[in-house]
Image (spheres, rainbow, N blue to C red):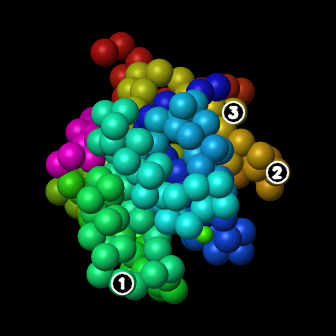
Amino acid sequence: MGHTGLVVRILLVEDDDSLASVVARGLREDGYAVDVCGTVLDATHQMDVEDHDLVILDVGLPDGDGLNLCRSIRDDGSLVPVLLLTARDGLSDKVAGLDSGADDYLTKPFDYPELTARIRALLRRPTATRRPDLRVDDVRLDPASRTVWRGAITVPLTAREFALLQMLMSYPGDVVTREFLLDHVWDSNYDGMSNVVDVHVANLRRKLHIDGEPELIETVRGVGYRMGSAVS
Ligand code: CA
């Protein structure tokens, strides 16, 4: 099943394997979908087969220069936000980075919170693919600020619960299967507990529950879950 464009998808181009795996793990824990590659060639291929919401691009790659790759992304007409990672700190490199069409840069070594702050800032920009709020019944979800409200009440969710709710709200009135949720909210190679979707739905229901108000997530026995009226 292909990418639905509903979860924020990041392409990480970094040939330092240990750095790439630390960053990718952090981003996945924060609820992003992440594709990782270590060469210009792989990055070009990844961008052909997937739509990314943001690219994190190391400048020094084994088969080429991240700056040139960034230029070719822009030459292709893509406005995807690009965050450069550079080991260098010279002013000329920064200027060259921004001249290449990159939106921002970060000098190594960097702290992970600094990286995620930059990512959030880039995704908030109007040039980024801004997704509208989702609404089902009295629940509202803002993908940009990653905030959920039921009525006027803000509902604090974990990154995974947020991604799960976002997926259910993206198909109002439709049954969303457990397999689809596993593929899109967890990694497709997820091999943890088999009832992970049900456990997270239960937590989501508990957090969205308001005494006296109707339950919003319906169980469709043996299949999956549904939000919103079946007849719209
Ligand atoms: Ca490198």
Give the spatial CA distance, label 1 vs label 2.
Answer: 44 Å
Q: Secondary structure at mark 1?
A: loop
Please give the name of the residue rendered at 37% of the width and 55% of the height, measured from the top-left corner: 82
Q: Earlier in the sequence, mark 1 or mark 3?
A: 1
- Crowding around mark 2 (Cα neighbors within 10 Å: few <14, some 14 to 19, many 20+) is few
Q: Position of residue 217 (x, y in %)?
A: 47, 39
Quarter occupied by the C terminus = top left
Disc sitting over residue 179 in the figure: 3
Please give the name of the residue rendered at 34% of the width and 65% of the height, measured from the top-left corner: 97
1 and 2 marks in contact (CB < 8 Å): no
For this view, does 62 lie left or right of residue 158?
right
Farthest residue in the top direction? Answer: 231
Tell whether position 134 is magenta. Answer: yes
Which mark lies nearer to you, 1 or 3? 1
Name which residue type carries label 1: Gly
Residue 170: name its quadrant: top left
Q: Earlier in the sequence, mark 3 or mark 2?
A: 3
Which residue is tagged 1? 90
The answer, for residue 188, to whether it is visible in the render is yes
Which residue is tagged 2? 191
Give the spatial CA distance, label 3 vs label 2.
Answer: 12 Å
Please give the name of the residue rendered at 68% of the width and 48% of the height, measured from the top-left corner: 187
Name which residue type carries label 2: Asp
Q: Earlier in the sequence, mark 1 or mark 2?
A: 1
